[in-house]
Image: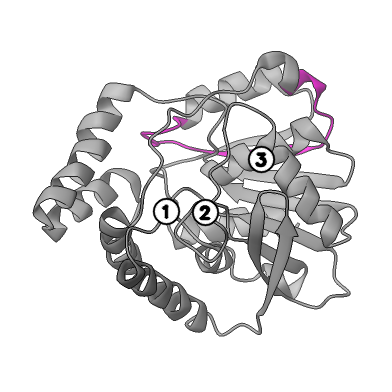
Amino acid sequence: MFKSKLGKDEILRLYDKKLNSLDLDVESITVHTRYGETNILATGDPANPPIILVHGSNGCAPIALETYANLHKRYRVFAVDVLAQPNKSADTRLSMKDDSYGKWMNEIIGVLELESVTMAGFSFGGLIILKTLEYDESKIKEVYLSAPAYIVNGNPLKAIFKVFIPMKRYMKTKKVEHVEKFLSALFTDRDEFAIEFLSKVFLEFEMDFTPVPVIDAKKALAIRTPITIFGADEDLMFPGKKMLKRARKIFPSLKNGSLIEGSKHVQNNEQNELIEHEIMG
């Protein structure tokens, strides 16, 4: 998925830079799965209950650890590097249309010998968690989804003009102003690391532009695991109000659905702290 060794080295240097900035005692674990090696960052007391964090598209585990920076005080945190993303896991690209992501995550849970595990995911990570529940939810205690993919989609024309075109213009011109325009449509607050990281990813990584599917209502009705969803009020990709409306119709196990006012697709620090507080109870 990396276009060159130099590009990969530059992206993974930024990965390590973010990880080292977190001031956490982190253990790196490699889990061998049928889909390839999966890198996982673990932190927190091993005696604590387990929680799995799943980052969004074009992301990595250190970003997930930073997003909810206090979970390690209460949980044994496992932040997963999603396959075929700009991180340290294998470059096997799974299909969003079948149960591959569910099989993969359940395999990880089995290898780590986890029981009664909580899961928390942002954006594309939400799709992965819902796929996990579809395939086998027996070892999942509860899930928290922030601006998740796979429930509803936004207006594709808006996405093309505000997200896709600025990305393509940057890839053609290498002018950072186009990355900043892309991020201003998706991020509630400016994020300097995201500008630096995605400036490399857009040029040096083969991104997946496959349309994101939405969960079948029958599959959603079969899920029994408690689900908490945080919809983002100003989310271009997965509009919060539309998402919560559908979620209340199709998920019998929906425990709570909250709309984060003033939030674009990517929440700011204050909004993430509210989500984190909810997770930690």
Residue count near mark 2 (Cα–Cα under 10 Å), binned few <14, some 14–19, many ≥20: some
- Residue 188, given in percent of the width and then of the height, sits at 35, 51
Residue count near mark 1 (Cα–Cα under 10 Å), binned few <14, some 14–19, many ≥20: some
Residue count near mark 3 (Cα–Cα under 10 Å), binned few <14, some 14–19, many ≥20: many
Q: Nearer the viewer, mark 2 or mark 3?
A: 2
Q: Distance of mark 1 from mark 2, alpha carbons?
A: 6 Å
Q: Is residue 11 left or right of residue 102?
A: left
Which amino acid, by three-letter code, is at mark 2?
Answer: Asp
Q: Is residue 50 left or right of residue 28?
A: right
The magenta stretch is: 220-239
Between residues 34 and 118, which one lies in front from this camera angle?
34
- Find residue 69 and name its label: none
- Residue 65, given in percent of the width and then of the height, sits at 58, 67
Kind of element beneath mark 1: loop
> Which sits earlier in the primary sequence, circle 3 or circle 1?
1
Q: Are marks 3 and 1 in contact (CB under 8 Å)?
A: no
Which amino acid, by three-letter code, is at mark 3?
Answer: Tyr
Between residues 141 and 257, which one lies in front from this camera angle?
141
- Find residue 101 and name its label: 3
Kind of element beneath mark 3: helix
The residue under label 1 is: 1
Q: Distance of mark 3 from mark 1, alpha carbons?
A: 18 Å
Q: Nearer the viewer, mark 3 or mark 1?
A: 1
The residue under label 2 is: 91
- Residue at 54% of width from left, 26% of height from top? 243
Is the residue 2 above or below the residue 18 in the image?
A: above
Which amino acid, by three-letter code, is at mark 1?
Answer: Met
- Residue at 57% of width from left, 54% of height from top? 82
Is the residue 97 above or below the residue 269 in the image?
A: above
- Residue 114, given in percent of the width and then of the height, sits at 87, 58
Is the residue 64 above or below the residue 142 in the image?
A: below
Residue 72 visible in the current orientation:
yes
